[in-house]
């Protein structure tokens, strides 16, 4: 989607060859009109796939996923990054490694918000190694549901996330695909 | 606001006299149409106050704050609950105690997303002790800006949050005010 590529080109900043800073519009300061455009683009791409529920991971995935759920008229369910004392005992959990942040965390969702037979659209802000989506997929299969699509705001094509997700059979759609980053700038692949 | 009181009466559950479970529509599974109503109600209440920026705390505040920012056509800035390695050194930080969850965390925001002279609308899902809003207020004052309003989705009137925030001079507006909770049900005060 041109709108996201253009925004990254204008306001994104390559901190190094791995880390793309988009905190002025996506994950710290958030441009909600842009998030609305993301929601419309995801809804448009995945319409007709029989999606019944939108899911994401706290907290940077929430804004784009929220606008997608609103646009599609579907419930949004947010995976928590740790066990809640309240939901404890009635949850699905799996360990996920974040290579970008070099931490491991437990992806957690209350079983009652992930019933059997659902077709999930999983939305996230970044796709790098694909760990979050793969972890979400494990939980969703365990629940007897399936990932019917994965919507990514920014994909780093120089990392193996897409390859890993496609190997699992997932339909991955990214709004912007970053091919490389350096002090000279950010290069994109057409989505 | 009747819509929020009615939704809590229907789908909320008092876990004990302190903890109100609203995870089927507000903070785990999220009803985005309801969040849109919250955004409209906050925008309506605070219009004419010269608000320039909406702020909230990750992650449960994001959905209602996002809809408020969208409705008001303003940027949304999300306080992080810990130091990011990326923003480190260029941030405002303050320690906040969450009594509900019995943890302390650092409320963090990059200085460039909180310039001087801003009039902030601070949105949060719950008001209990008021610690998050008081912490946010400290940071916002330090930045040379001010809190021009506080919008709360659910206030627990049996805890001192409102009294503490009003003592700081803040204008607090809650969509639902819970007076007490027990196995018998949830009692409300009219907002």
Image (cartoon, coloured by chain):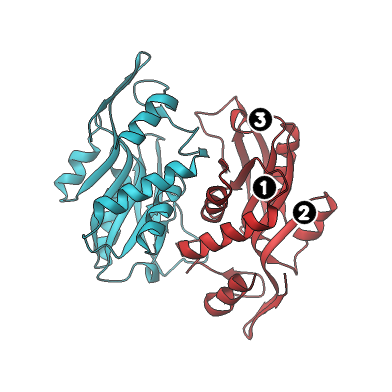
Chain colours: A red, B cyan
Describe the element under mark 1 as helix, strand or loop. Answer: strand
Q: Mark on residue B173?
A: none
Q: Quadrant of residue A108?
A: top right
Q: In the rendered image of this protein, does residue A143 appear above or below residue A73? A: above
Alpha-carbon span between mark 3 and mark 2: 21 Å
Q: Quadrant of residue B43?
A: bottom left
**Badge 2, how many Cα within 10 Å: few under 14, some, many 20+?**
some
Label total for image: 3
Describe the element under mark 3 as helix, strand or loop. Answer: loop
Describe the element under mark 2 as helix, strand or loop. Answer: loop
Is A66 on the left-hand or right-hand side of B126?
right
Residue at label 2? A171
- Residue under the point 53% across and 53% down: A67
On the image, the x and y values in percent for residue A182 come to 65, 80
- Tell me the quadrant of the picture where the N terminus of chain B can be found: top left
Alpha-carbon span between mark 1 and mark 2: 10 Å
Q: Quadrant of residue A190?
A: bottom right
Q: Chain of mark 3?
A: A
Looking at the image, is mark 3 or mark 2 earlier in the sequence? 3
* Residue closest to the eye, A163 or B40: B40
Is A81 on the left-hand or right-hand side of B101?
right
- Say if residue A14 shows up in the picture: no
**Badge 1, how many Cα within 10 Å: few under 14, some, many 20+?**
many
- Furthest-right residue in view? A167
- Furthest-top residue in view? B184
Residue at label 3? A115
Q: Mark on residue A121?
A: 1
- Residue under the point 42% across and 25% down: B10
């Amino acid at each position: 989607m041109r709108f996201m590529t253009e925004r990254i080109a204008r306001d994104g900043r390559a901190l190094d060859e791995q880390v793309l800073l988009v905190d002025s519009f996506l994950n710290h300061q958030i441009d909600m009109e842009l998030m609305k455009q993301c929601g419309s683009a995801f809804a448009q791409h995945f319409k007709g796939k029989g999606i019944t529920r939108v899911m994401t991971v706290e907290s940077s995935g929430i804004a784009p996923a929220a606008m997608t759920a609103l646009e599609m008229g579907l419930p949004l369910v947010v995976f928590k990054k740790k066990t809640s004392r309240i939901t404890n005992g009635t949850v699905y959990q799996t360990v996920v490694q974040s290579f970008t942040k070099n931490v491991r965390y437990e992806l957690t969702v209350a079983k009652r918000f992930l019933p059997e037979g659902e077709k999930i659209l999983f939305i996230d802000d970044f796709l790098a190694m694909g760990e979050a989506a793969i972890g979400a997929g494990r939980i969703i299969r365990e629940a007897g549901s399936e990932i019917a699509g994965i919507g990514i705001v920014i994909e780093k094509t120089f990392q193996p996330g897409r390859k890993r997700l496609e190997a699992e059979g997932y339909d991955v759609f990214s709004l912007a695909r970053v091919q490389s980053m350096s002090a000279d700038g950010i290069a994109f692949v057409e989505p």
